[in-house]
Image (tube, rainbow, N blue to C red):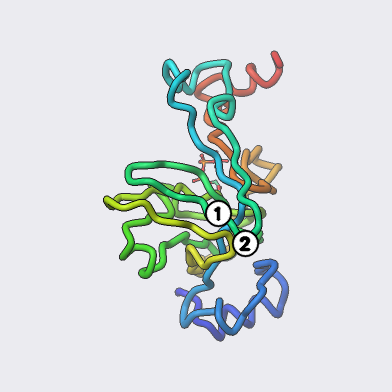
């Protein structure tokens, strides 16, 4: 079951679903979703000195990225073909009986700007800001203004609560992320992540 505006409000008021700050509920709560705003931090890949991003490497992916913080009144220009990580302004807390879907907004889609390449799910139990995988699939640069509504979240009720929700108990690596976070794929078990963490 997908939550309607009334269901979303009810869950926000009950306090187990959190989206904060929700600066303008009237504007942001849509018929069956919540619009999320763009934060001011962006991570861009440095193309010049990357031999290859290898999940098995001891070099963290975030060594290959540079951060840009957009000042008040400025924009981030997303050029055709660019891929950068952005963040939602809001942080969310998803209860154990809901899953949230990160979706684009039609108005941005019509400008060829997409908000995720492949990762569109926020797990039950997830807490933190949401990292956006921003790309411009069009042919003209597009200005992105921090604070603009960039994305929308929909919520689906699970048949039963997740038994092992996202979080530290299962070693979830993006729990409580603050700002855009580069991939932490090196800490996946299949790439010897725990060993790498111990060796550091
Ligand atoms: N566009 C997105 C999608 C998801 N997330 C957050 C919420 C998810 O609950 C969390 C983990 O997402 P996945 O389970 O898809 O990612 P991994 O499987 O790589 O992470 P983990 O091993 O921690 O489960 O990342 C995010 O910040 N931005």
In the image, 105 versus 74, the foreground residue is 74
Residue 49 at x, y = what percent? 47, 18
Dot 1: few (<14), some (14–19), or many (≥20) neighbours within 10 Å? many
Determine whether the residue tagged by mark 1 lies in a helix, strand or loop.
loop
* Residue 64 seen in the current view: yes
Identify the residue position indicated by label 1 in the image: 123
Tell me which residue sits at (50%, 18%) in the image: 56
Task: Kindly report the distance in space between the C-alpha atoms of the residues bearing marks 1 and 2.
Answer: 7 Å
Identify the residue position indicated by label 2 in the image: 94
Determine whether the residue tagged by mark 2 lies in a helix, strand or loop.
loop
Tell me which residue sits at (61%, 50%) in the image: 70
Tell me which residue sits at (54%, 49%) in the image: 86
Task: Check mark 1 vs ligand 1: CB closer than 8 Å? yes or no.
Answer: yes
Residue 74 at x, y = what percent? 58, 56
Is the Cβ of the residue at disc 1 closer than 8 Å to that at disc 2?
Answer: yes
Task: Check mark 2 vs ligand 1: CB closer than 8 Å? yes or no.
Answer: yes
Rendering quarter of residue 168: top right
Q: Is residue 10 above or below residue 37?
A: below
Q: Is residue 3 above or below residue 65?
A: below
Residue 186 at x, y = what percent? 55, 25
In which quadrant will I find the N terminus?
A: bottom left
In the image, 199 versus 30, the foreground residue is 30
Q: Is residue 102 above or below residue 118?
A: below
Residue 169 at x, y = what percent? 70, 42
Dot 2: few (<14), some (14–19), or many (≥20) neighbours within 10 Å? many
In the image, 44 versus 94, the foreground residue is 44
* Farthest front residue in view: 73
């Amino acid at each position: 079951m997908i939550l309607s505006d009334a269901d979303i409000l009810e869950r926000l008021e009950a306090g187990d679903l959190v989206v904060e700050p929700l600066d303008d509920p009237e504007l942001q709560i849509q018929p069956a979703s919540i619009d999320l705003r763009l934060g001011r931090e962006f991570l861009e890949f440095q193309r010049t000195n990357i031999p290859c991003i290898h999940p098995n490497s001891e070099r963290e992916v975030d060594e290959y990225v540079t951060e840009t913080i957009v000042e008040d009144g400025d924009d981030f220009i997303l050029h055709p073909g660019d891929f950068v990580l952005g963040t939602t302004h809001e942080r969310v807390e998803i209860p154990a009986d809901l899953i949230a879907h990160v979706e684009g907004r039609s108005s941005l889609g019509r400008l060829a700007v997409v908000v995720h390449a492949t990762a569109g799910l926020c797990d039950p139990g997830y807490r933190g800001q949401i990292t956006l995988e921003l790309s411009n699939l069009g042919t003209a640069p597009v200005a992105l203004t921090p604070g603009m509504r960039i994305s929308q979240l929909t919520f689906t009720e699970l048949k039963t609560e997740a038994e092992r929700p996202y979080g530290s108990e299962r070693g979830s690596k993006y729990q409580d992320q603050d700002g855009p976070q580069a991939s932490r794929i090196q800490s996946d078990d299949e790439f010897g992540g725990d060993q790498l963490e111990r060796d550091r």
